[in-house]
Image (tube, helix red, strand yellow):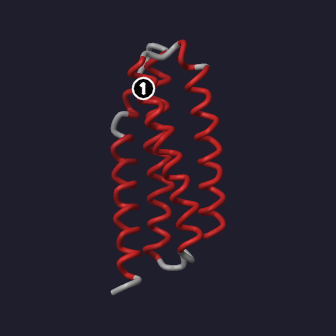
Amino acid sequence: MVLISQALGAILGLLAVIFGAFGAHALKKSFSEEQLKSFETGVKYQMYHAIVLIMIGFNFNLDTPSQRFMAYCFLIGTFLFSFSIYGLTLSAAKGKTWKFLGPITPLGGLLLVIGWALLVYQFIGRYF
């Protein structure tokens, strides 16, 4: 599970760089300023959580259910949060907003919050 967390974190980081470059260059012409900022938010959160997935792979064995759940929360939360933002902004730029993605973004955000709370729990658990 540790190698999977690190590999998926690296893949998410790679994609964040590619999406960031794509947004900065290709989408700049077809996106409004607000859409571009939203897209960049998705990229930033994707990169932050890619780094977190790699970091938890180095700091935890991910052998307990709570550690695995934490990794899943970060992974699934990142995918739901960032990729729903990408879908919303790309579809809005084409004039057909995929409104079904709207509720997915906060669900992804909730999973990220749960992941961070579980990370706090893991760190505190080491000392008490």
In the rendered image, the vertical position of residue 118 relative to residue 16, given as above or below: below
Q: Is residue 13 left or right of residue 99?
A: right
Residue at the spot 59% in from the left edge and 55% down from the top edge: 9
Task: Tell me which corner region of the image, top left, top right, bottom left or bottom right, holds residue 62.
Answer: bottom right
On the image, the x and y values in percent for residue 13 come to 60, 47
On the image, the x and y values in percent for residue 80 come to 45, 45
Q: In which quadrant of the rendered image does the C terminus lie?
A: bottom left
Between residue 126 and residue 81, name the one nearer to us.
126
At numbered mark 1, what does the secondary structure look like: helix, strand or loop? loop
On the image, the x and y values in percent for residue 79 come to 50, 46
Q: In which quadrant of the rendered image does the N terminus lie?
A: bottom right
Task: Tell me which corner region of the image, top left, top right, bottom left or bottom right, holds residue 41.
Answer: top left
In the rendered image, the vertical position of residue 51 relative to residue 18, given as above or below: below
In the rendered image, the vertical position of residue 47 relative to residue 100, given as above or below: below
Residue at the spot 47% in from the left edge and 32% down from the top edge: 40
Q: Residue furthest bottom?
A: 128
Task: Tell me which corner region of the image, top left, top right, bottom left or bottom right, holds residue 105.
Answer: top left
Tell me the kind of residue under disc 1. Trp
